[in-house]
Image (spheres, rainbow, N blue to C red):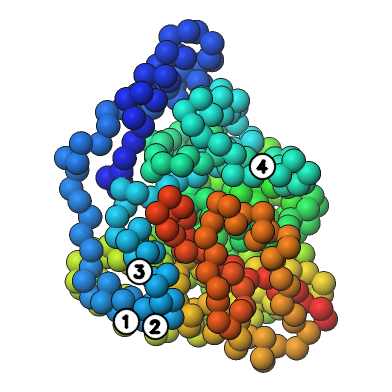
Amino acid sequence: MLSLKFLSRANVSTACSYMRSGRFSSVGRGLHTALCIKEDTGSRAERKVCESVLEQFNTQYREELGEVWLSAREVLLNPHCWQYGVLLNRFSDHLDIKAVLKSLGYYSLLSQPDSPIDRYLQCLVHKDAVRLPTQRHRQGWLKQYYLLNAVSLLPVLALAVRDGESVLDLCSAPGGKALAVLQTANPGLLHCNEVDKSRYEWLVKTLESYVPRALRDTHTVTNEDGRDIGSKRPEMFDKVLVDAPCSNDRSWLFSAGAQQGELRLRERAKLPQLQKELLCSALAAVRPGGLVVYSTCTFSRAENQSVMEAVLSTSQGVELVDLEEELIGSFSGHFKFAHLQPPLGHLVVPEQGRTWGPMYVCRLRRSS
């Protein structure tokens, strides 16, 4: 686990006083017990930056992002300043948790009263780099919250899932976006796929930890190559999410040693072709009139706009669906959006005070 700033003594004291007042259930008291932890004193081992990855990123992103990269790099190299969102699980009792978190300065990321997504989806964020402890997996017990980079909700919101729709999460592990889909609506079918065996098992455990057994017949989990799903299940889904394998800038900067960093950089050149094939598979799997959302957690133009350009130029009956009016404007106060060239999709870049991202998201509609 990263060494991060946790709750201040003042906030912990507030939490403890609430607990002593007897106004919370056992769930609330359990959470407060978890929150009453010592502040990070820096005793944990610091994560080391992989210099070869940083050098590659500096060269590429200075050219592609200019000054934006300098401020984003400052955030990415300092995990102590990273912010985390708390996605509440609507299938579990979280009322006490929500009250506690709000008393500690958390606020709702989704504060649009007329938005249909507010019916279920609740994500709380804090202005500071506060990270709650994760909850352990326990058989037969549903976790109450899921920690995530709050900007990763954008691709899910871009899908605009409605009750009864069939949804494909093509590259689903570890499962955070699948959970978010289930928080936004009641899909008739949620098909989660993950090609990597160990990540597939992680995905299965995640769903077991958050979704009631009675609802599990509404979702399926497969361990297949996502590039084949479009041909195996053509025109089967109303909405498809392609959260594609990518350079994952945050993680790669802290690769476990020079050898892993060099290996990742060599494999990086193969990613755009894989991403194009996954996106084409998604377009084959979605019904005419359906939506496909493509996302990554990298700044890389080759893995973002260039992938979209290539697929749009070679695919018939596919159109770009802008997100500016529907989503981007609503979140401009929470997230910093870069000006992309070419202007295909949207890119969130981290900055001090708003450390969310990177996250690229683009939405397509299959018209025929």
Q: Going 48% across and 83% down the picture, which residue do you hit?
A: 302
Q: Is residue 110 above or below residue 168?
A: above
Most extreme residue toward the bottom, as rendered? Answer: 314
Relative placement, left or right, of 305 versus 71 is right
Residue type pointed to by label 4: Ser
Query: What mark, if any, has residue 108 been given in the picture?
Result: none
Residue at the image point whose x is 69% and y is 65% from the top: 324
**For the residue carrying disc 2, how many other residues have a C-alpha within 10 Å: few (<14), some (14-19), or many (20+)?**
few
Q: Is residue 77 above or below residue 225?
A: above
Q: CA distance from mark 1 to mark 4?
A: 39 Å
Q: Amino acid at mark 1?
A: Thr
Question: Disc 1 marks which residue?
Answer: 59
| Front residue of 325 and 233 | 325
Q: Are marks 2 and 1 in contact (CB under 8 Å)?
A: yes
Instruction: Say if mark 4 contacts mark 2, CB within 8 Å.
Output: no
User: Residue 252, how many percent across, how many down?
Assistant: 33, 67
Q: Position of residue 348 (x, y in %)?
A: 52, 64
Q: Which mark is residue 63?
A: 2
Callout in the foreground (4, 3): 3
Residue 70, label in figure: 3
Foreground mark, 3 or 1? 3
Per the model, the C-alpha gap separating discs 4 and 2 is 36 Å
| Residue 189 position by quadrant | bottom right
Whichever of labels 4 and 2 marks the residue nearer the N terminus, that label is 2
Q: Label 2: state its secondary structure.
A: helix
